[in-house]
Amino acid sequence: MLDDLSERAAWLACNVLPHEALLRARLKGVRVFGLDIEDVIQETYTRILSGPSLQSIQHPKQYAVQTAKGIVIDHVRRSRVVSIVGTGCLDTLSVPIREANAEERLEFQEEVDAVIDVLARMPEKFRQTLIMRRVEGLSQKEVARRLNVSEKSVERYLTESVRLLVTLFGRGGKNRANSSPMAKEIGGEDVVDKPGS
Amino acid sequence: MLSTSREVDQQAGRWAALRDLGVLTPEQQEEFRQWLSADKRHLGAYARAEGSMVRVYRACNSVRGVLSELPAANIPSWSRRRVVMTGAVAASIAGAGFFGVELWRRSREQVFVTGIGQVREILLTDSSVITLNTDSKVAVKYTSEMRNVHLLQGEALFDVAKNKNRPFVVQANGTLLRAVGTSFTVSVLPQKPVQVLVREGVVELRRTGTAFAPVRLSANTIAVAPHDAPVSATVIPPAKVVRDMAWQHGQIAFDDETLEDAANEYARYSDVRIVVDPAASRRTITGVYISNDPIGFAKNAAAVLGLQVEVNGHEVKISCRSNSNG
C-alpha cells in the first residue's frame, strides 16, 4: 500500500478532489443519526483508493458519489436505531448519468482558478512554506533559512498549510458569498478585501 | 475514543508534511503504516492531504498565461540557479515567483515589464493585482511595513488589497500615490505629466520636492500632476472610467478624439505607425477598437469618415480621397 500511495493520492487529486464541494453538497441532504458527513467523505476516499484498479474508474465524480452513498447505507444497516430525517433523502445522492457526463471534465482552467483562490486566502507564511517546498522543491533547511525560522517550524507550517488546503478546497473556492466570513477568519489581514464589495 | 474527522485531518496533514519533507525515521514509518490501517477514514484523509499539495503543484506548473508568463529575467538570482534544469521546473519557479514576490528576500526589488502590445496581470503575495499595459515597467518592493511599487514607464492598473497597517505606495516620476484598499491606474508617458485615474476607493497624491499640498482623489476622478503646477483633478462619469480602462481587455476606446490623438495612442501598442494627413488629422472618431490592430482601426476610421487608407509595410497612411468633392 505504501509503495504507490503517492501515486494514488495524485490520482485522487486529479480526478476526485476537485469535486469535493459537490460531494459534500450532495451529502448535506442526508441526516442520519450519529453520522458525520466529514467522516463519510474521508471514508469515501479510503474506499476508492482501496479498490483494485483506479484506472478502471471511468467517471470518478459519479463513482465518488456512489461510494459515499454506499457508506451511508452501510451505516444505516449497521445501526440499530435508525433515524433518517426527511423521507427518500438518499435519493439526493444520485447524480443523473447525463448530467454527470456533462460536468465530468472539470475544466483545468477552473482548477487553476480554484488553486489561486485558495492560495490567496492562506496566511502568508503558510503559503510561502507550501510554495517553496512543493512548487520550488527547496529543502526543509533552505525553507527555514529563507523564512528565518527553525526547521521544526517549517514542519509545523507545512502541516498547517496542508490542513488549510484541505479545508479551503473542500469548501469550494467558487462561492465567495458563502465562504467570505470564513476566509476572513482564516486569512487574517492578508485576505483580499476590496472596498465597496 | 474515536477521533473526530477534524482530528483525523490534523493527523493526516502532519503525516503528509513529514512524508513530504522526508524526515520520517524508520520507527515513524512503521507508526504511519499502523496509523493508516487503524481507522477506515485514515487512508482517505491522508490521500486527500497529499493530494491537495499535488493540486497546488499541478496548477502552479500549468502553462496558463499569468502563471508561466514570467520571463527568466524576472526570476530572482537565487532562483535562477535552478532554472538550468527543465522547462517544467523553470515554469514551476515562475509560478512560485508569481505568488511569492515577497519570498524573494524581504527587501529585494522585483521588476516586471511588458513589450509593445502586451498586457500582463501580476498577482502579488498580499493578493493585490497589478495589470501592466503595453510597453510598461514596474518595480515591486514589499517590506513588512510598506508595499512599495515604482512605475518606471507606461501605464498600470493597481487593484490593491486592503491592509491599513501596510500602505500601498506607488511612485511615478516624482509623484507619490498612497492607497489603502482601492483600484486606480497611473500612467507615465513620454512628454506627458503623470496621470492618475481612480476607479474605487481613495488615493492620496503628493508630489515630492514641491510645496503643493497633498490631494485626495476619490472614485471616478482623473488627475494630472505636472511638474511645475498644482495637481488638477476632474470628476468624470463612471462610463468614461470604464472606457479609459478598456486596455485591460486589449481594447482602446475613443470618445470624439482626433485622428491625430488616436494615431498617437495606437503608437503605444504597435510598431505599425498610423500616419494621418494633416488635412484629415482634426477629424474625430468614437468607438472601441482592438488595441493591437492599428490597420483594422485605420480602415474602419477611414470608412466611417470617408477617407482613404494606404498600407505600406509598417506604415498606414490615412488621407483625404484624391477626388473628394466634399
Image (cartoon, coloured by chain):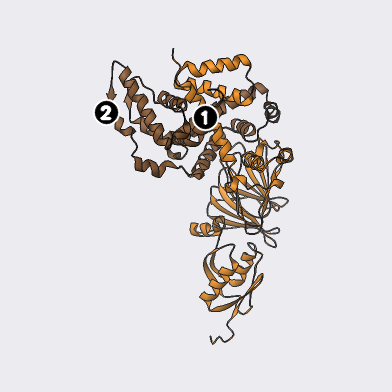
**To which residue does mark 1 refer?**
A8
- Tally the numbered discs: 2
A15 to B35, vertically: above or below: below
Going by the numbered disc 1, the residue's amino acid type is Arg
Circle nearer the N terminus (2, 1): 1
On the image, the x and y values in percent for residue A12 come to 49, 32
Measuring from the top left, give residue A98's x and y in whole percent: 35, 43
Q: In this view, does B232 lie above or below A74?
A: below
Q: In the figure, the brown chain has which letter?
A: A
The answer to which image quadrant residue A71 occupies is top left
Chain letter, disc 1 residue:
A
Residue A181 is at least partly visible in this image? no
Q: Where is residue B177 in the image (x, y as percent from the top left)?
A: 64, 48
> Residue at the spot x=51%, y=43% of the render?
A108
The numbered disc on residue B86 is none
Q: Is residue A51 left or right of residue B113?
A: left
Seen from the viewer's position, the closer of residues A47 and A132 is A47
Q: Is mark 2 on a helix, strand or loop?
A: loop
Residue at 68%, 25% (x, y): give it. Answer: A149
Between B232 and B1, the one nearer to me in the picture: B1
Question: Which element type, helix, strand or loop, lies under badge 1?
Answer: helix
Which of the two marks, 2 or 1, is nearer to us in this view?
1
Residue B117 visible from this viewpoint: yes
Residue at horizontal 74 percent and vertical 39 percent from the top: B81
Can you identify the residue that label 2 sits on? Answer: A86
The kind of residue on which mark 2 rests is: Gly
Check if mark 2 and mark 1 are on a common chain.
yes
Horizontally, residue B7 falls left or right of residue B159, namely: left
Specify few, some or many for label 1: CA neighbours under 10 Å numbering under 14, 14-19, or 20 or more.
many
The residue marked by circle 2 belongs to what chain? A
The answer for how far apart the CA atoms under marks 2 and 1 are is 36 Å
Chain B in the picture: what colour?
orange
